[in-house]
Amino acid sequence: MYTLASILPHINSKRHLVRNAEQPIYDLAYDSRKIRNAEHSLFFALKNVRDGHTFISDAYQKGVRAFVVSRDDIDTTLCPEASFFWVNDALKAMQDLARYHRRQFRKPIIGITGSNGKTIVKEWLAQLLQEDKKVYQSPKSYNSQLGVALSLWDLSDDYDCAIIEAGISMPGEMDQLEAMICPDIGIVTNIGVAHAEGFASKTVKLTEKLKLFKHTRDVIFPSRYAFGKYLSGETRTFTFGENDVDQVQVSRIAERQEGSSSIQLIYRQEMVTFTVPFVDKASIENVLTCLTTLLFLGYSMNAIIQKLGRLRPLEMRLQLKTGRYNCSIIDDTYSNDLASLQIALDFLRQQQQHKKKTLILSDMDGLNDHLEAKLVSVLRQQNLHRIITVGKSLHRLQDKLDTLLLSFDSTEELVQNLGNIAFENESILIKGSRRYHLEDVSKLLVAKSHETVLEINLSALEHNLQMYRSMLPPHVKLMVMVKAFSYGSGSFEVANLLQFNKVDYLTVAFADEGVELRQHGIDLPIMVLSPDEQVFESLLDSDLEPEIYSFRILKALIDFLRIRKQKDFPVHIKIDTGMHRLGFLPAEMDELTTLLSASSEIKVKTVFSHLVASGNSQHNDFTTQQISLFSSSVDKLEVMLGYKVVRHIANTSGIVNWPSAYMDMVRLGIGLYGVDMNKKMALEKVSELKTTVTQIKELPAGVTVGYDRKGLLHRPSRIATVKIGYADGYSRRFGGGIGEMSINGQRARTVGSICMDMCMLDVTDIGAQELDEVVVFPDLMEAAERIGTIPYELLVNIAARVKRIYFYG
Ligand SMILES: *Cc1c(COP(=O)(O)O)cnc(C)c1O
């Protein structure tokens, strides 16, 4: 247990003001929206995207009484009961503290790095070890400079070992992570091309990643990557592969029926053969990494093989689904520990579409008094309508919480009684550990689903948002384009996340889209592109702000507002600097300002224009000209209006390529959704369109497949029918082998024409089975190029009937 006095020596503080040296500290906080245990939190004012110092008073109001800050101009009299520590760099101070805390942990720490597979290896190892050890693992995606510090802070003597993931995206980052984690055992997974962007070459990236193991005695990896030569001479390697020097020699991998593979190994002169429930190369390599690690740790081969048989692919976390009775269901029925519960509760809190919030919670593994006290304090911080517990030991929460509590001994008992609990218009978080099978509850509450789904990864979206934000100077505001159903990926589901992350503005294409956001609790300012007269009423009712692009629409709006006796109605003026689509021409500024100055009904909030070719360096001169034309037009407008307006012109490519065009605000679109038109950013994939194989047929050469006999088979073939067609947004242009989907990580081409609800794939050369999952666009950019379009079109064409599934974490 720490107090302010015991923390002080470990954060390198230059100066401090301590009011209560004995104040106990359990939590590290950095985000005033995510404070859980205020009176026992130490708040670090990080200079992230937002300057954390601006949230000190907010955190103080919530009860935080201890702050680590780097700015000298803090007015401490505003927080009369709080202690302050001044440091040069608050993140560094948090890392130093985490590092000190980690040193108190005497059990082994396994550090994992790599480009692909590190999360899955971490989760699988935890699953495998959990059967006989208490394992701490860093929560998913907590692998960064901040995430690792927070992960390490939660280490305690309750655990027998820890598995910590380290991720970097730029040279120079690993030293700091190494100093904190200082792993006893290292694991390297696949070093692929992912996130190569920040590095000059693969070798540079590899050298940087392997710095994690500077002081590590033993490192485990697949020998085909030959990482050994980059490690220090002191380090011992423990490898698997086909080489003579490998401790674990893989002699044969063969695919068997029904999605499983048989693997033959030689370890210490003994040969074994066993089956694993995977066929794709990546999963098999990850399984072998786990197996090799367990051998290294001294488990017997027999015990390991039994454990491996129980491995399952990782399910997605925190899925947000549409429920029955107008509920939103957040499904997280895969694990239950405090760290992941807190992440899930934060996500529940983001959901603005319903006021009412319910938590269905199973028993936690290893719940002792210490963890229970923490659990109670976490639950007390939440504004929950009710809590439904499953499992015998949670009954006793009854006496400790004020929230309405319903308790059931088992999942079966809850399922039997589910019909008696009135669920309606609420967000329900279902959170349970695997052995409780709470998915049985979620199935009953979720509205029936269609086989073709678009999965949307909200944490990837959040990551991409931060990537772009980090490029912008602090004074530049951020407007996010959520038009066209957020480029196909959803309305309030995406907007909730943006609102939570405090973007400044949202933009929709139609007033209806804005009205829907308002109905679901979104209160950010919303701009509506090119509205017409029919929607003025709903603009006014729903507090939406129109783009004004012509004299006709401007005059109509003024007339409308005059009748309604409205003053200072906020509008956004569009100037046409070269797109020649909508907007006032620069030559029309005089006439425009005359009209605006005479109309007290209207207040110009922002003035904007749109770049025609910000992503195309061929037209750099034209872009420069657009920027200067825009600036001079707005200068003129401001002079004549007599007040300053917010200026914006840059879209995603403008953010990436044209810092001189940031002005007061930028408009982020496609990049947020994970499509990097400029191939310069380390973005994460946000949406994945998936379907299933409905039937597989063995057909002889010479027969044809599909309408008009378009798909002639030149060899005996296996043909898979999949449940997606042009009515789902899969263009007919993908027919005849132009389109490629992916099954178990392998590509399959279309055969014949695309039908309305289905199409056919040639799976002769790959191991596909009926009911296998199919990824429709393994590479969105490539798919778009194949049919001569752009990723924007593929995304927004995904039909409304395709069910969206959201997940986070
Ligand atoms: C769609 C749109 C954007 C965003 O463009 P991206 O290329 O997706 O970043 C910006 N401004 C306006 C006016 C738009 O219509």
Image (spheres, grey):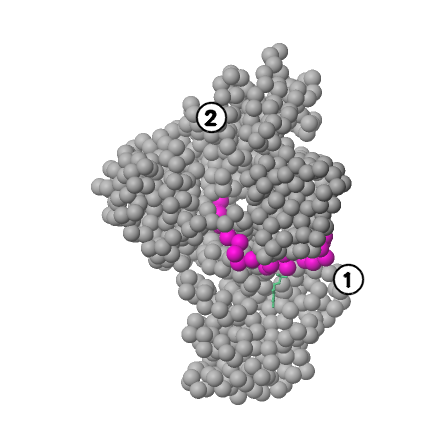
Would you place residue 13 above or below residue 602 in this image? above
**Residue at 72% over, 43% down:** 703
**Residue span colored magenta:** 782-809
Tell me if I can see residue 302 in this picture: yes
Give the crowd class for mark 2: few <14, some 14-19, many >=20 residues within 10 Å.
Answer: some
Q: In this view, which residue lies farthest toward the left?
A: 399
Pointer 1 residue? 618
Is 607 included in the stretch rendered in magenta? no
Vertical comparison of 72 with 597: above or below: above
Mark 1 and mark 2: Cα distance apart in space: 56 Å
Establish if 233 lies above or below 180: above
What residue is shown with label 2?
129
Q: In the visual, does 185 lie left or right of 787?
A: left
Q: Give the amino acid type for the residue marked by disc 2 in the picture.
A: Leu
| Circles 1 and 2: CB atoms closer than 8 Å | no
Q: Residue at x 59, y 29 (%)?
A: 257
Q: Position of residue 47 (x, y in %)?
A: 51, 52
